[in-house]
Image (spheres, rainbow, N blue to C red):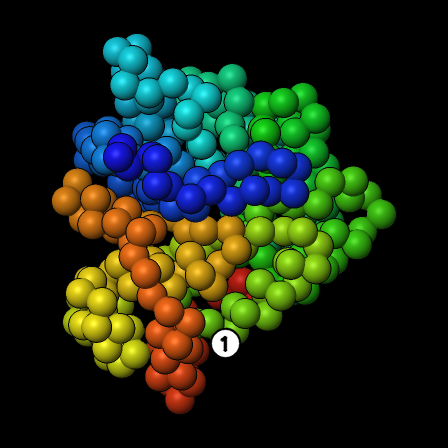
Amino acid sequence: MSPTQFMPTVQLSNGVSMPALGLGTYRLKGEACRRAVKDAIEAGYRLIDTASVYKNEEDIGITLAALMKVGTIKREDLFITTKIAPKDMGEEKTYNAALESLRKLGLDYVDLLLIHWPGTQGLPLHNPKNITNRLATWTALERLHKSRKARCIGVSNFTAEHIRHLVSHPSTTVHPHVNQIEFHPMLYRTQVGVVQECRKWGVKVQGYSVFGEGRLVDGSVNLGGAEVVADRVGASIAQVLVKWALARCDGGAVIKASSKERMVENLGAVRLHIERKDLALIDETMKDTEDTRFCWDPTPIS
């Protein structure tokens, strides 16, 4: 059985199917990025996640073009995500930034275009212009969606309040298809509220930093229940964390890996069977620990 035959998918509110597991490319550049994307596609990944601020869209585009040229993959089999940078918030800046991302990627469209961050670069956290710019940026994403330059549109790092304001605003005509947020057992109590709010509006939540920027898999953090479950089912901590995220996030997850072997190992998590009691054990052992973010905190942004 090929790797893609057992890859589960998530159906978004507009009917588009998105792979439940994808490769994150944050901090990957140059040859390392090209090699990682090639290895991931050969291993069976079809969702590749990038962003303007990662500064690797051209590397990814070059790799995809080479693989499509030799017939390794077809464009319609890929799901490419990129994101609008905080410096490009505002309707026209966002629209032009999206076109530039498409140029760098060498693509006519992306499968998912996200607002990377709810705030605007250079603005104080509580400045009301953050709200104004967010709405204007969303208008641009709706234009890009309507013109088929983005099959799906969404947001990243949005809190429940940010989601609620966006979907209920009179100018919004399309609800976000995805909200991509930091998601792991050490932040579950905070993020479960975001998942619940998104579910009300048909927004799928996709997790990132499932490994806590590596801290949850390098032995520096005691994960308690996850370690017990890993021992019981004969899996790695990383696989258990991926499976936990897939169970707790209704929009799947994007994950990073340091080698092709790790990519294959992580991909194996989709076939891993863990029971509800295992998930509950992981949650239970985290309840007495303080919620921890390994990435940026969007909660102070107006």
Residue 158: % across, % down:
58, 57
Residue 212: % across, % down:
32, 64
Residue furthest out toward the top: 69
Closer to the camera, 45 or 98?
Answer: 45
In which quarter of the view is residue 35 placed? top left
Residue furthest out toward the bottom: 288
Q: Is residue 139 left or right of residue 112?
A: right
Q: Residue at x 49, y 59 (%)?
A: 249
Q: Quadrant of the N terminus?
A: top left
Under mark 1, the amino acid is Arg
One can see residue 186 in this view? no
Q: Quadrant of the C terminus?
A: bottom right
Residue 11: % across, % down:
56, 42
Residue at image mark 1: 189
In which quarter of the view is residue 247 placed? bottom left
Residue 146: % across, % down:
70, 26
The vertical placement of 144 against 193, above or below, is above
Q: Residue at x 33, y 66 (%)?
A: 274
Q: Is residue 291 left or right of residue 273?
A: right
The vertical placement of 218 against 88, above or below, is below
One can see residue 276 in this view? yes
Q: Residues within 10 Å of mark 1 (few under 14, many from 20)?
A: some
Disc 1, SS:
helix
Q: Residue at x 42, y 44 (%)?
A: 8
Q: Residue at x 17, y 40 (%)?
A: 260
Closer to the camera, 146 or 120?
Answer: 146
